[in-house]
Image: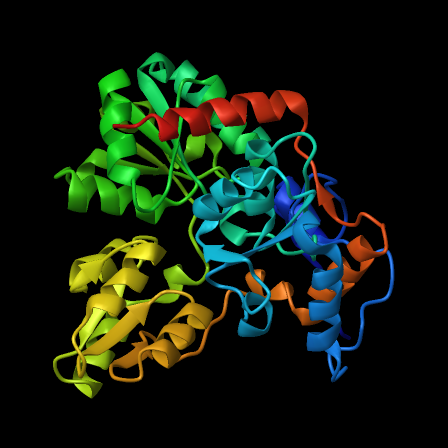
Amino acid sequence: MCVVTTAQTRTESLDVQPTPLALLLLGREADPRSERGVECPGDLPSPSDPDLVERARAAKEKLGDRVFVLGHHYQRDEVIQFADVTGDSFKLARDAAARPAAEYIVFCGVHFMAESADILTSDDQKVVLPDLAAGCSMADMATAEQVAECWDVLTDAGIAEQVVPVSYMNSSADIKAFTGRHGGTICTSSNAKRALDWAFEQGEKVLFLPDQHLGRNTAVRDMGMSLDDCVVYNPHKPGGGLTVEQLRAAKMILWRGHCSVHGRFSLESVADVRRRIPGVNVLVHPECKHEVVAAADQVGSTEYIIKALEAAPAGSAWAIGTELNLVRRLANAHPDKEIVFLDRTVCFCSTMNRIDLPHLVWTLESLAEGTLVNQIQVDQETESFAKLALERMLALP
């Protein structure tokens, strides 16, 4: 006799109620505000269409100055070639705001980035994401409901008034709005220390959302705190899995979130590349685990990585711990240097790679024909508080 045990029967036998996230993964519920999958209202061109490049070029030329295409560094080369500007998420959102004449902002990135562009651009501009399923696993790890529950936990522990939220740019508009509403600020990977310095001038503790690694690395590596000053709040456990005493003793309350790409690099990755390439410089993003950052030669944001390789001497060897599309593009741009991916296993950002040439062609051709598709709109209340948090970041010394 064969007995099939499903996820549902296992949870029922354990008398455990599935979390909303578990239900989403099981396909038993839907969340209209989720960054996960939707279908395009129309047929995409075939990815094997040999005319895709010409079709994209023709549609973009037809739109002229009415469209402004943003390309994140982690995008495919086939998409980046049509970007008017490239950069990290915040730089691109600011670039969009600096082009008020552009009617359409086509953001080749992921959902939270397009939300930030909508927040910073004028009401007359329409932000478009070529594939609405291009989300971010890190941003998905902190929902508005979970963070509100966390704040209740901090309130019950009697420390909420001492806590200043600092949210990474890689977060949803809802989380940015929460941050603005509670007196906090946003940070990028390049200004995280400045943001934390400011936050500790406002309060005694920081709630850092949603990437635990950037928060921990900044606090310990750049600000001289100890690992004991940091605790990790797990939204899937009662009270975040922490005691009241742990919360009261902590300086940094780190959300249990991470980047699926940067989180895969390990100490073994560093040791392996050092064995294979004598004299190699290991350069990693601060979203990597703390032990990887501690073992690296240099640590910095995406823009830092790009500038470091531009300034590196010919003949030098580099192992880069960040997304593969960027590493490969940098290797091609600097043939006089040896530039390799830190890990032997090739790993793209899967959600970022949802933006491909067929989706971009479909988007541009639809806009050229007068059909607005995949518009990203942040509601007015969320936008006002999110913008407040972003403005606090812009005002950092």
Which residue: 77% across, 63% down?
A: 362
Q: Nearer the viewer, residue 372 or 27?
A: 372
Q: Is 319 on the left or on the right of 126, as rendered?
A: left
Quadrant that contains the N terminus = bottom right
Residue 98 vs 108, above or below: the answer is above
Q: Which residue lies furthest to the bottom in this view?
A: 276
Q: In this view, does 296 lie to the left or right of 120?
A: left
Viewer-nearest residue: 232 or 109: 109
Q: Which colour scheme is used?
A: rainbow
Q: Quadrant of residue 187?
A: top left
Q: Kindly identify the residue that appears in the image at 23 percent across and 72 percent down.
A: 270
Above or below: residue 290 compared with residue 276: above
Q: Where is residue 342 in the image (x, y as percent from the top left)?
A: 31, 74
**Left or right for 190, reference 120:** left
- Number of labelled discs? 0
On the image, the x and y values in percent for residue 119 come to 58, 32
Note whether 240 is above or below 249 in the view shown.
below
Residue 170 in view, yes or no: no
Give the left or right position of residue 125, taking residue 158 as reference: right
Q: Looking at the picture, how far across and down is residue 9, in whole percent?
A: 71, 53
Write the residue at 12% across / 39% down.
224
